[in-house]
Amino acid sequence: MKKKAKSFKTQLKKYLGIKGLDIVVYLRDGKSIELNKNRSLVKDHIVLVDKNNREMRIPISQIVSVDLFAA
């Protein structure tokens, strides 16, 4: 199981680095969040920064699935 989680994190980091890719994450609580272009992976969290410099963190452990769209 640990190897699977590490593989997901590696793939996610790769996709977060592609700025032309639209990413939607689906969380355990049923929410879906579209990630903006100012996104990065810090430890076990996806960090989003909006245009007002507010930071939002999404724990990787809460992600159920991810959809990728070419922009």
Image: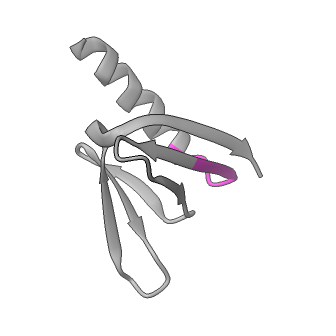
Q: Nearer the viewer, residue 13 or 56?
A: 56
| Residue 11 drawn in magenta | no
In the picture, residue 40 is in which quadrant? bottom left
- Please give the name of the residue rendered at 33% of the width and 73% of the height, measured from the top-left corner: 55
Q: Is residue 53 left or right of residue 43?
A: right
In the picture, residue 43 is in which quadrant? top left
Image quadrant for the N terminus? top left
- Point out residue 8 in the picture as x, y percentages from the top left corner: 40, 26
In the displayed structure, 5 sits above or below 52; it is: above
- Point out residue 24 in the picture as x, y percentages from the top left corner: 56, 48
- Point out residue 64 in the picture as x, y percentages from the top left corner: 41, 34
In the picture, residue 2 is in which quadrant? top left
- Please give the name of the residue rendered at 37% of the width and 20% of the height, measured from the top-left corner: 7
Q: Residue furthest bottom?
A: 52
Q: Nearer the viewer, residue 25 or 50?
A: 25
> The magenta stretch spans which residues?
16-23
